[in-house]
Amino acid sequence: MINENRMHDLLGKMVSEMGAAAVGSLVSLGDKLGLYRALAKDGPLSAGMLAEKTGTTERYVREWCAAQAGSGYIEYEADTDKFSMSPE
């Protein structure tokens, strides 16, 4: 007999782990491409400005920024459509 509570807990853990793996990959990518460094040095920046400063493609940088802002790693300023990092 299946324990519904145990199954629910297991599925929650799996979803959490998959999310952590995706975020971890994006953190590594941001470090390797210099996205964090550029934001820390020159931010706040739009996705286009960040792509230009790092020699990357704006379309992908916009997706990276949205994911990082959603995860709380960077900040999004809706009124200016720019991203930044906190001093910490």
Image: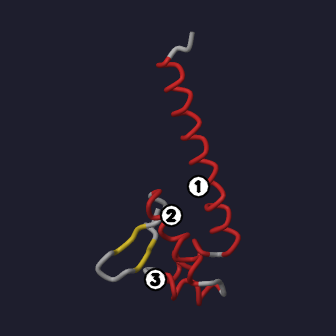
Three-letter residue code for mark 1: Val
Q: Nearer the viewer, residue 28 or 58?
A: 58
Q: Where is residue 45 in the image (x, y as percent from the top left)?
A: 46, 83
In this picture, is 65 found above or below 50?
A: above
Check residue 4 in the rendering and tell me which mark sits there, or answer none.
none
Three-letter residue code for mark 2: Ala
Q: Is residue 68 left or right of residue 60?
A: left
Q: Where is residue 70 in the image (x, y as percent from the top left)?
A: 44, 60
Give me the residue at 44% from left, 58% from top.
72
Residue at far front of view: 1
Q: Which circle's residue, 2 or 3, is located before the other in the chain?
A: 3
Three-letter residue code for mark 3: Leu
- Residues packed near mark 1 inside 10 Å, few (<14), some (14 to 19) or many (20 plus): some
In this picture, is 51 found above or below 85?
A: below
- Residues packed near mark 2 inside 10 Å, few (<14), some (14 to 19) or many (20 plus): some
- Location of mark 3 (residue): 45
- Location of mark 2 (residue): 67
Q: In this view, does 48 lie to the left or right of 21?
A: left
Q: Where is residue 7 in the image (x, y as percent from the top left)?
A: 54, 23
- Location of mark 1 (residue): 23
Give yes or no for contact between labels 2 and 1 (Cβ–Cβ under 8 Å).
yes
Q: Position of residue 32 (x, y in %)?
A: 70, 70
Q: Nearer the viewer, residue 7 or 48?
A: 7
Q: Which one is closest to the eye, mark 2 or mark 3?
A: 2
Residue at far left of view: 79
